[in-house]
């Protein structure tokens, strides 16, 4: 047996100078040898804490042991019992804050944790390349509607199909995937991977109807009449704006519009696809999450000479994944820490030319537990920019919510659903993901979908037994 390495087996990546000019995937995946080398590092803990910190509770030691045994079909079968989207999660899930954070190997002062996410991707990619799939089972237990085809909707539908339910997903856009298709750039999550995993879910018997706007094309009342239960997973797709002076200038836009044009509408391949995207030489991105990283790195790839991320706290509070931040720095993205925009400046003809900012210092903790940024008087300065992308979060889409007043909302305008059952106040109606919690991660949305599938099964079974 090979000696256990102190550090994770590195995954090859595109050179930063090269990749900052293209939208091809940055991380290139493990070879078979690299996958086995990393799998050997796993301690095979009996009471593995990594499982408990995985929102979908994957048997992590089990699939890693199968890799060590060179039994890739078994490794995939184990993962597939828990996750419908492993190739996606292996790429975008924040493992460093979940399963890898509690890895016992990583608790040693000498060793890094096992690269669980990279191993999940390795197994899932192998399965996709070898066309591995499970035999579908008869779908005769009932009919369930799912509104939204993002990670939560795909998960609940996939799990219900495995339980024997006929699940139909209604998607407002022309393409399934939700944020996986319109939000996450190709260099982090290739659309071919998203399409392949969605096709596997469809092969299990899940139906996906696109271009259906629930609340317009079909009503919630019609859905509740036609199905035994319904799960709402429409995400949080309405962009937030800071609302500072100058927001209406040409050149100021939300990250959701910018990334949708690039990803879902293939703007980065213009003129092959007729979706033009603004290409500026000096771009400012407001925010510090993964979406801000995606926007900044995409702007760089579109030809910007200077991309500056403006964040009101320090790098220690940055909510983005550490890997994404480091990749951005390697690609030449610049940062203005402890800085907040106060006004967008125009040229007199309605076009953006700069961002007036003010320096901040950290004061007492706010409701999030992080120290609140406080403006420093007389510290204003200007960053030249012809394009600003605001990536400061998103809120609930009102079309469905306002069309169905029977369903209770919370004080923030999200669906009021029980966190332990995903049930709403309407019998047979469940909800989960960002439309309940506000903007969160792909894997947390998937966790809600898994929980909801079990609760929907219990609900329908109970109704039929009465």
Image (tube, rainbow, N blue to C red):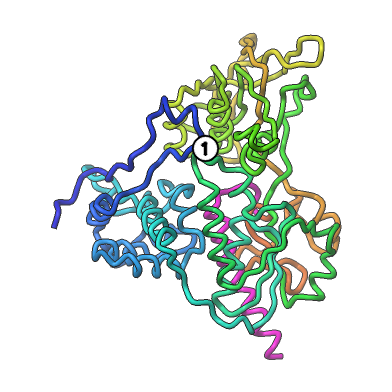
* Residue 275 or residue 396, whichever sits in front: 275
Residue 271 belongs to magenta span? no
Where, quadrant-wise, is the N terminus in this rendering? Answer: bottom left
Direction from residue 352 to residue 119 in the image, left or right = left
Mark 1, secondary structure of its residue:
loop
Q: Position of residue 207 (x, y in %)?
A: 66, 68
Residue 456 belongs to magenta span? yes
Quickly name the residue at label 1.
319
Q: Position of residue 203 (x, y in %)?
A: 56, 69
Snapshot quadrant of residue 296: top right
Q: Residues within 10 Å of mark 1 (few under 14, many from 20)?
A: few
Q: Position of residue 17 (x, y in %)?
A: 41, 25
Q: Main secondary structure of the magenta part?
A: helix
* Residue 57 or residue 67, whichever sits in front: 67
Can residue 91 be seen by looking at this rendering?
yes
Residue positioned 61% across, 22% down in the render: 284
> Where are the magenta residues, as a range?
437-466
């Amino acid at each position: 047996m090979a000696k256990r390495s102190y550090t994770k087996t590195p995954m090859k990546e595109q050179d930063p100078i090269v990749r900052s000019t293209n939208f091809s995937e940055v991380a290139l995946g493990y070879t078979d040898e690299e996958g086995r080398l990393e799998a050997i590092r796993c301690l095979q803990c009996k009471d593995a804490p990594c499982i408990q910190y995985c929102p979908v509770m994957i048997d992590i030691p089990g699939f890693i042991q199968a890799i060590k045994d060179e039994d890739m079909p078994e490794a995939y079968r184990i993962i597939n019992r828990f996750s419908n989207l492993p190739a996606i999660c292996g790429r975008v899930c924040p493992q460093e804050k979940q399963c890898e954070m509690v890895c016992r190997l990583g608790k040693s002062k000498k060793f890094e944790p096992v690269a669980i996410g990279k191993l999940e991707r390795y197994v899932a990619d192998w399965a996709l390349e070898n066309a591995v799939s499970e035999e579908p089972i008869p779908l005769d237990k009932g009919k369930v509607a799912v509104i939204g085809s993002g990670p939560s909707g795909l998960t609940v539908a996939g799990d219900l199909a495995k339980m024997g339910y006929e699940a139909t997903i209604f998607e407002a856009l022309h393409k399934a995937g939700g944020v996986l298709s319109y939000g996450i750039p190709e260099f982090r999550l290739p659309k071919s991977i998203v399409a392949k995993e969605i096709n596997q879910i469809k092969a299990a018997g899940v139906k996906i109807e696109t271009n259906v706007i629930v609340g317009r094309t079909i009503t919630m009342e019609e859905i509740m009449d036609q199905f035994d239960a319904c799960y709402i997973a429409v995400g949080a797709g309405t962009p937030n704006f800071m609302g500072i002076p100058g927001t209406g200038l040409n050149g100021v836009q939300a990250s959701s519009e910018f990334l949708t044009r690039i990803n879902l509408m293939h703007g980065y391949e213009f003129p092959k696809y007729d979706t033009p995207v603004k290409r500026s030489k000096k771009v400012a991105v407001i925010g510090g999450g993964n979406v801000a990283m995606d926007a900044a790195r995409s702007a760089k790839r579109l030809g910007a000479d200077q991309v500056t991320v403006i964040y009101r706290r320090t790098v220690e509070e940055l909510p983005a994944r550490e890997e994404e931040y480091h990749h951005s720095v390697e690609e030449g993205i610049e940062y203005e820490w402890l800085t907040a925009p106060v006004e967008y400046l125009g040229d007199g003809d309605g076009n953006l030319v700069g961002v007036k900012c003010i320096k901040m210092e950290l004061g007492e903790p706010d409701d999030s537990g992080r120290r609140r940024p406080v403006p420093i008087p007389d510290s204003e300065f200007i960053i030249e920019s012809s394009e600003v992308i605001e990536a400061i979060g998103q809120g609930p889409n009102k079309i469905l919510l306002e069309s169905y007043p029977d369903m209770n909302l919370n004080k923030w305008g999200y669906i009021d659903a029980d966190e332990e059952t995903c049930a709403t106040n309407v019998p047979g109606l469940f909800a989960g993901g960002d439309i309940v919690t506000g903007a969160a991660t792909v894997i947390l949305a998937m966790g809600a979908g898994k929980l909801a599938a079990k609760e929907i099964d219990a609900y329908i079974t109970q109704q039929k037994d009465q």
